[in-house]
Every structure is written in C-alpha cells, then in structure tokens.
Amino acid sequence: MMICKKLARITTCIVLFLVVSCSKNGVNTTSSNEYSDKPQHTILTGGSIREASGIADSKANPGYLWVEEDSGNPSQLYLLGHDGKIAGKVKIAGGTNRDWEDIVLGAGPVNGTSYLYIGDIGDNNSTYSSYTIYRFPEPAINIAKIGSAAVTKFSKINFKYPDSAHDAEAFLVDPGTKDIYVITKRDARSKVYKLPYPQDTTKLITAVYVSDLAFDLVTSATLSPDSKELIVKTYTNLYFYSRSPTESIATTLSRTPPTLFYDVEQQGEAVCFALDFSGFYTLSETRTATPATLDFYKRN
C-alpha cells in the first residue's frame, strides 16, 4: 500500500510539473477578478498537518476550519483556526480512513441542521469496488477539552460507479436537493456522478453519471454559503462558476468557467469558502521542507 502510494505521488508530481508548465504557457486565458490575486499566507502553528486533503469552514465552531488527511492517516479531523493555530484533533470513532479526499459542510436529513460529509473516495490505482461518504451532524467542540472529543455516531453512504472504478478527490452537496455530486480526478476529463437524495444508508447504491468536465486532475470543490458561487480546484487552477441557487449543480458544471488567480501550492488538494462571505481558503499537503500555509483569498 505504501509503495503504491509513493508511486502515485511521484506520478502526481510529474503531472503537476507538466500541467503548471502548460498553464503558464497560456492554456487558461480567461480569468475572474472576484477575489484578490494576493492571498494571505499563514504558517500553521501548534503542530503540523502534512497531508491535508479537504477543508470546510465550521459553523458550529466559528473561527475554525475542519481539516482531514488522506490515506495512511488516522480516522480523525483537525480543528484549525483561521489564524493558523491547530486547536487539536477530533476522532471519528469506528470510521476507516482508507483514502479520505474531501470534506463538505452542508444540508442533510434534518432541515436546519448542518452536517459534515467526509468523502472516502480516493482510489489512486482505480481498484476498489465501492466507496463511502460519512455523514453526521456537525459537532460543537469544547476547545479546552478537544483532546477527548470524538464523533461516535454517523451514517455511511456506500456507493459504486455504474461503469468502473474511479479515483475521486472532490464532491459537493446541493443545498436545495441534498443530492451529492462526486467529481473524479484521473480520467482524461474529470467525470461528474450524482448520488440522489435520499441516499440509502442500508445498502450499496449506484451513482448516476452526469457529465464530463472540460479539464481533469480535480482535487477539491466548494460551494459558497449562499450557493451563488462554486469553485472546482485542480493542482494548477481554480475554476469559478457563478450560479443561480435554484439551478442544479449539474447545470452549473455544464458551463465553461473562467479561472480565479491561484498562487500554486506544493500539492494543493483543499479549498473552501469562508462562511462570512469574506473570501475562500486553500490548504496544501506538505511535500518539501518548506511548511505548507493556510492561504486566504479575500473577496474584492
């Protein structure tokens, strides 16, 4: 497993180098100026998060972000302050981190309740027969006692694809319909699949193919608090979609988006909007001796 993971990362770094080179040569020429092109870089303190694969701004714990790590790490979430200080870890007791690749704060079965969704959807070698998304009400954490904090109850949405195995690192939850949209990574063009609500948590369900995007290597995605903006992240680009809150995410993703300015990270696999509408955050894995930073892009 570790050998496969290392080989996959070497391949990713090679691809990232090639894609960065192409991007700089003008492949993506349209851009949006909705957000600052000078992000605020904040070095993490109070520890390290080496393999961040997803972030979500917390509603129950204002001023903090939920952060997950991918395969090879414990089944736990970090609470990371907007100031870059790591408050601690929250265990997902009974959960399995085969390859957690994105996290979403969104609507769920009980109206008015915010849910956390953890996507165990990574599959570097496209060999798994099924995948899991964990869902539970977002917990409010006593930061002073975070060392003993744990989530012990959750639902598991187990699914498979209708065609073959796929590696995915991004998903979204439609706040209107509560449908889940999974976006694959390593296909020639990233594919979009839907898990219609209500998702059955008692059996293996089959995702529904929706469409292909015009690009690949998607590593994360996020929807703004008012549902009017959507960002799809790759290693080298932030694709920006404006949308009507009443249209489906499938319709939104069918358009050709402009890009936002992006200060390319070491291996950026996480993006989320700030809940106060002030901007959005990105966070990278740490791939070199230089520490990764929490980056914030302020709304213009």
Image (cartoon, grey):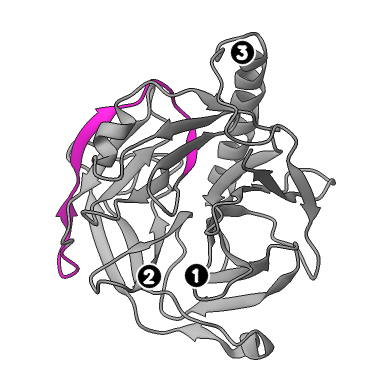
| Disc 2 crowd, CA 10 A, few/some/many (<14, 14-19, 20+) | some
Instruction: Please state if 80 lies on the left or on the right of 220 as rendered.
Output: right
The residue wearing badge 2 is: 114
**N-term mark: 2 or 3:** 3
Please, which residue is most extreme toward the right here?
289
In magenta, the rendered stretch is 200-221
The residues tagged by marks 1 and 3 sit, at their Cα atoms, a distance apart of: 38 Å
Q: Which amino acid is tagged 1?
A: Lys
* Residue 291 part of the magenta segment: no
Label 2: element kind = strand
The residue wearing badge 3 is: 22
Label 2 close to label 1 by CB (< 8 Å): yes
Q: Which amino acid is tagged 2?
A: Ser
The residue wearing badge 1 is: 59
The residues tagged by marks 2 and 3 sit, at their Cα atoms, a distance apart of: 40 Å
Label 2 close to label 3 by CB (< 8 Å): no
Label 1 close to label 3 by CB (< 8 Å): no
Instruction: Please state if 166 lies on the left or on the right of 164 as rendered.
Output: right
| 95 over 184 or under it: above or below | below
The residues tagged by marks 2 and 1 sit, at their Cα atoms, a distance apart of: 8 Å
| 124 over 178 or under it: above or below | above
Label 1: element kind = loop
| 141 over 111 or under it: above or below | below
Instruction: Please state if 220 lies on the left or on the right of 132 as rendered.
Output: right
**N-term mark: 1 or 3:** 3
Q: Which amino acid is tagged 3?
A: Cys
**N-term mark: 2 or 1:** 1
Tag of residue 277: none
Identify which residue is drawn at 43% across, 74% down: 138
When asked about the image quadrant of residue 229, the answer is top left
